[in-house]
Amino acid sequence: MNWTEPKPPTEGISYYDHITSETPLGRVKIEWKSWDKNDSYDVEIDGLRIFAEYSLEAAKNVAKEYYINVT
């Protein structure tokens, strides 16, 4: 998956820091609250929250595994 660089909150996309990847299933987004030291990284695919992890790399892996298992 090709991920964007981390972006700050962006109107119309996310209220939190986030990265995205465009896929045939739709936009995959991982978002987090950078000011919260214990926050989770929420994985969302085409507007549906599917999972949360406690590191960005783990969240990327969850998104990849989900994508592989669905397609």
Image (tube, grey):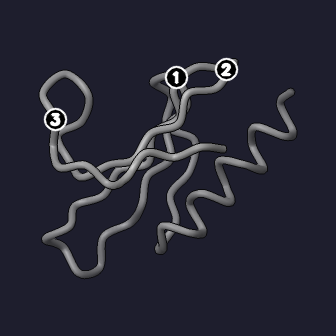
Q: 32 left or right of 64?
A: left
Rate crowding at label 3 as few (under 14), some (14 to 19) or many (20 or more) other CA atoms within 10 Å. Answer: few
State yes or no: discs 2 and 1 in contact (Cβ < 8 Å).
yes
> Which amino acid type is marked by label 3?
Thr
Mark closest to the chain's N terminus, 2 or 1: 2
The percent position of residue 47, horizontal first and vertical second, equals 45, 24
Picture layout, residue 13 above or below residue 32: above
**Mark 3 = which residue?**
10
- Give the mark, 3 or 2, whose residue is nearer the N terminus: 3
Q: Is residue 60 left or right of residue 42?
A: right
Secondary element type, mark 2: loop
Q: Name the residue under label 2.
A: 25
Circle 1 — which element?
Answer: loop
Question: Horizontally, is 35 left or right of 32 in the view?
Answer: left
Q: Residue at label 1?
A: 46
Image position, residue 59 (x, y; %):
56, 60
Earlier in the chain: of badge 3 and badge 1, it is 3
